[in-house]
Image (spheres, coloured by chain):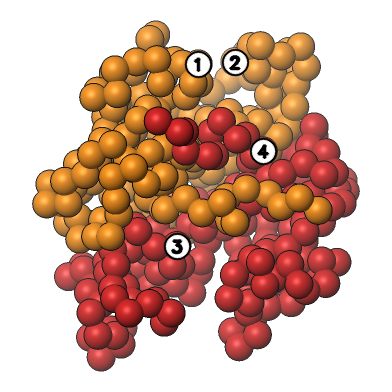
Chain colours: A red, B orange
């Protein structure tokens, strides 16, 4: 990446966060979607307008036992690795915005640790094969899966103070 | 870890997920709390009964510019690394439960990729020092921080289908 690839108002760190390894991830599967660069919906609301039978999780079968107890209809959080993201952008100017903001104030895939997060609902579940149908998601086909967690409002919604 | 440390109904993988490295994390700070093994609240609702001035995020100052645009009162998702967790448990029996469930059906810290997630609200913000006051969190003092994201209901709440 070169400085030329920084848009007006954006800033990059003077180091690449990937150079220091504090912990390691082992991908547990892949997310399957009809989306690739060029046709990817701008957000999950748009993705929900697509055909949901084309969006599912393929869990690596060695982890399939970990799905026991999940139910069709349940809300789950998917954590996934934005493998095409850039890790050194610290302020960014989204295309729809007139000013730059800090990376931690944005949901941009470009961040020091490009782990994305999306709440979806289970539409089908095959524990033996590890295939989980989901309502919709807006990531590219083949995006590596990091984790699946059940949604709990008490943990996933900030409290009223 | 030995088989003896598995409770009735629990199952471990026959490999350690940390042995294969698919991606790497660079911690971006630490979460400061009054909690350690022995006094840690069972959940975030209990943690909110504590003194919130004792709970805050210390972002590594090299990333502080990434906080620009965040506001006091805003809801944020904290992603953090459960560094004392075990990565090979694939079914688990929580102490309060009478049966084991798959790891992906639980919010247990023990999981192939022990990245935890908690929605909190910003109570104070010092962008220069990278110190962010939060309402409450139930992790141990010194827990490594992986990411901060703004909460968005459309992404963080599963849809009604």
* Disc 4: CA contacts within 10 A as few (<14), some (14-19) or many (>=20): many
**Residue A108 locus on image (x, y percent):** 43, 67
Of helix, strand and loop, which one carries label 2?
Answer: helix
Of helix, strand and loop, which one carries label 3?
Answer: loop
* Real-space CA distance between mark 1 and mark 2, rounded to the nearest whole angstrom: 21 Å
Same chain, marks 2 and 4? no
* Disc 1: CA contacts within 10 A as few (<14), some (14-19) or many (>=20): few
Pointers 3 and 2 in contact (CB under 8 A)?
Answer: no
In the picture of the structure, the residue carrying the numbered disc 3 is A107
Quick one: label 1 or label 2, which is nearer the N terminus? Answer: 2
* Real-space CA distance between mark 4 and mark 1, rounded to the nearest whole angstrom: 17 Å
Tell me: B47 left or right of A140: left
Residue A53, image quadrant? bottom right
In the picture of the structure, the residue carrying the numbered disc 4 is A150
In the picture of the structure, the residue carrying the numbered disc 2 is B5
Residue drawn at x 41%, y 53% is B149
**Residue A4 locus on image (x, y percent):** 25, 91
In the rendered structure, the residue with mark 1 lies on which chain? B
Of helix, strand and loop, which one carries label 1?
Answer: loop
Q: Is residue B48 visible?
A: yes
In the rendered structure, the residue with mark 3 lies on which chain? A
In the picture of the structure, the residue carrying the numbered disc 1 is B42
* Real-space CA distance between mark 1 and mark 3, rounded to the nearest whole angstrom: 29 Å
**Residue B38 locus on image (x, y percent):** 39, 8
Residue drawn at x 76%, y 11% is B98
């Amino acid at each position: 990446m070169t400085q030329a690839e920084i848009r007006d108002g954006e800033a990059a760190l003077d180091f690449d966060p990937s150079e220091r390894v504090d912990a390691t991830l082992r991908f547990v599967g892949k997310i399957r979607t009809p989306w690739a660069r060029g046709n990817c919906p701008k957000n999950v609301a748009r993705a929900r307008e697509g055909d949901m039978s084309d969006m599912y999780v393929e869990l690596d079968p060695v982890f399939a036992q970990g799905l026991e107890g999940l139910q069709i209809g349940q809300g789950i959080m998917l954590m996934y690795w934005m493998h095409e993201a850039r890790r050194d952008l610290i302020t960014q100017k989204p295309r729809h915005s007139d000013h730059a903001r800090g990376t931690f104030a944005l949901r941009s895939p470009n961040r020091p640790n490009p782990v994305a997060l999306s709440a979806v609902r289970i539409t089908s579940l095959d524990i033996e094969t590890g295939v989980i149908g989901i309502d919709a998601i807006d990531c590219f086909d083949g995006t590596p899966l990091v984790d699946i967690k059940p949604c709990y409002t008490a943990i996933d919604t900030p409290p009223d103070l």
